[in-house]
Image (tube, rainbow, N blue to C red):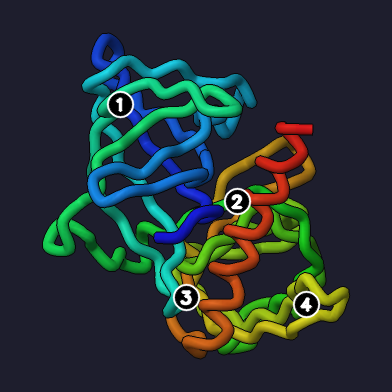
Amino acid sequence: MKIGTVLNLEVKDIETGETHEYHCKIIEKNDKFLIIDYPIHVKTKKTAFFSKGTYITATFMGKDQAVYKFSSQIAARIKLNIPALAITIPDNKNMKRIQRREYVRIETSLDIAVHSVDNQFHPFATVTFDISGGGLAVIVPTSTQLEIGQKTDIWLPLPMQNQEYHYVYGQTEIVLIRELNTRMNMVSLKFISISNSDRQKIVRFCFEKQREARQKELI
């Protein structure tokens, strides 16, 4: 983990048992500690003020473009040019390369084309509701008859940092259909076949979007 790495944090509320998500950035490091700026709550966009001893679970993207996960603890509050927190550096044995179901998910609207593998419904174009390395959710009119378990081919243009697009292809399975309103459903799809290259581009896209959101909050 190098300076500038974005960390996505999960912290469990002791009183309610609810898990909250935050993101922050590594601003300094030494042999024992990572120094992070104050975490921002993903949903409320509010700064979190954790006390010493708070347990956290963090994920980040490694040099190999894979996502890693570790547990740590707030060791101290630190005053640098900006308020900061010190967290303990995990041992290598406590660093876990996370499984597909644990990929970071972000809400974003991307154009997508959806086709039935078995011609069970007419092809349609729509937009995503959210996306991760493990799957995505799309907005679908209630007039389009879909069923859980159906297999689909999907294509979507993924915007990259260089203003170009990478066209992602994958095979997915419908795992959830939820009604949003009388006209629209949200349909969740999990990847059952996708190239490692395409998956890693999605993962990087998600982390870049989180980093951009973090930078805007600090302006």
Q: Determine contact: label 1, label 4, CB under 8 Å.
A: no
Q: In this view, does 199 lie above or below 42?
A: below
Q: Residue at x 57, y 21 (%)?
A: 47
- Give the CA distance from mark 3 to mark 4: 20 Å
Secondary-structure class at tag 2: strand
Q: Which of marks 1 and 2 is nearer the N terminus?
A: 1
Q: Name the residue under label 3.
A: 65
Residue 1 image offset from top left, x and y in percent: 40, 60
Labels 3 and 2: the sequence-earlier one: 3
The secondary element bearing badge 1 is classed as: strand
Q: How far apart are marks 1 and 2 (CA)?
A: 20 Å
Q: Residues within 10 Å of mark 4 (few under 14, many from 20)?
A: some
Q: Nearer the viewer, residue 200 or 153?
A: 200
Is residue 129 positioned above or below 214 on the image? below
User: In the depicted view, which residue is nearer to us: 140 or 84?
Assistant: 84
Residue 106: numbered disc: 2
Q: Name the residue under label 1.
A: 12
Residue count near mark 2 (Cα–Cα under 10 Å), binned few <14, some 14–19, many ≥20: some
Q: What residue type is labelled 2?
A: Ile
